[in-house]
Amino acid sequence: GKFYCKIVPRYATSPYFVGYKIAQVQNRQRLAEIAQDISERLDNQ
């Protein structure tokens, strides 16, 4: 019955970066790399 809470200052930071350390990117190649990484992680669950 324990709860954990992550408290960080929000500033102008994406909630994806705060929760998952995924930065918003405008680079299509980097975006494809991030998508591949997420896909591999989900497949390994």
Image (spheres, rainbow, N blue to C red):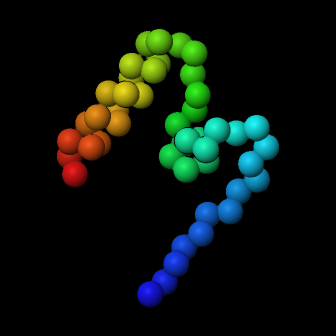
Q: Residue at x 51, y 46 (%)?
A: 20
Q: Position of residue 31 (x, y in %)?
A: 45, 21
Quadrant of the rendered image containing residue 13: top right
Q: Residue at x 37, y 28 (%)?
A: 35
Q: Residue at x 27, y 43 (%)?
A: 42
Q: Position of residue 12 (x, y in %)?
A: 76, 38
Quadrant of the rendered image containing residue 7: bottom right
Number of marks in the rendered image: 0
Q: Position of residue 22 (x, y in %)?
A: 52, 37
* Residue at the outermost bottom position: 1
Image height check: is 29 above or below 40? above
Q: Is residue 14 left or right of residue 45?
A: right
Image height check: is 40 above or below 2? above
* Residue at the outermost top position: 28
* Residue at the outermost left position: 44
Quarter of the figure with the N terminus: bottom left
Q: Residue at x 20, y 46 (%)?
A: 44
Q: Is residue 15 left or right of residue 44?
A: right
Q: Is residue 26 left or right of residue 33?
A: right
Image height check: is 16 above or below 33? below
